[in-house]
Image: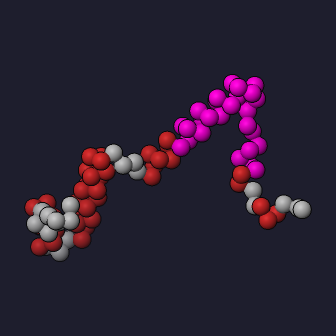
């Protein structure tokens, strides 16, 4: 990508006309194409995958133990400095 950035016909007009909006739009398109080509996930995709994984783990736990893991989220999100010793 770096080697042909300045010679790229797609970006040429944006640089020649000093058009930052077009440059931003084309840059986003190039990044999206690169991401799809190499299989990188977006932040939204990673969040969705993490939620699906968590849901699957909870389901397996519930099936194995006969109860859910309710309350654990509060435990993990709590402030350790607030715990009395």
Residue 66: in magenta span: yes
Query: x, y percentage for residue 59?
Result: 64, 29
What type of secondary structure mainly makes up the magenta span? Answer: helix
Which residue reaches farthest right?
A: 85
* Drawn side of residue 40 relative to residue 76, left or right: left
- Provide the residue span drawn in magenta: 50-75
Image x and y of residue 77, in percent:
71, 54
Nearest the camera: 9 or 37?
37
Quarter of image, res 52: top right
Where residue 54 appears, x then y in whole percent? 60, 39
Residue 9: x and y, percent? Answer: 10, 61
- Quadrant position of the N terminus in the picture: bottom left
Q: Residue at x 49, y 41 (%)?
A: 49
Q: Quadrant of residue 6?
A: bottom left
- Residue 20, compared with residue 51, is above or below; it is below
Q: Residue at x 40, y 50 (%)?
A: 42
Task: Report how many numbered discs are placed on residues in the image.
Answer: 0
Q: Nearer the viewer, residue 84 or 28?
A: 84
Say which quadrant the C terminus sits in.
bottom right
Q: Residue at x 53, y 43 (%)?
A: 50
Q: Indicate yes or no whether the magenta region holds residue 51.
A: yes
- In the displayed structure, 48 sits above or below 24; it is above
């Amino acid at each position: 990508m770096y080697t042909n950035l300045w010679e790229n016909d797609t970006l040429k007009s944006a640089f020649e006309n000093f058009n930052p909006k077009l440059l931003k739009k084309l840059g986003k398109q190039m990044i999206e194409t690169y991401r799809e080509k190499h299989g990188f996930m977006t932040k939204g995709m990673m969040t969705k995958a993490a939620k699906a994984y968590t849901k699957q783990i909870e389901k397996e736990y519930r099936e194995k133990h006969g109860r859910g893991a309710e309350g654990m989220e509060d435990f993990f999100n709590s402030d350790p400095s607030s715990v009395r010793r």
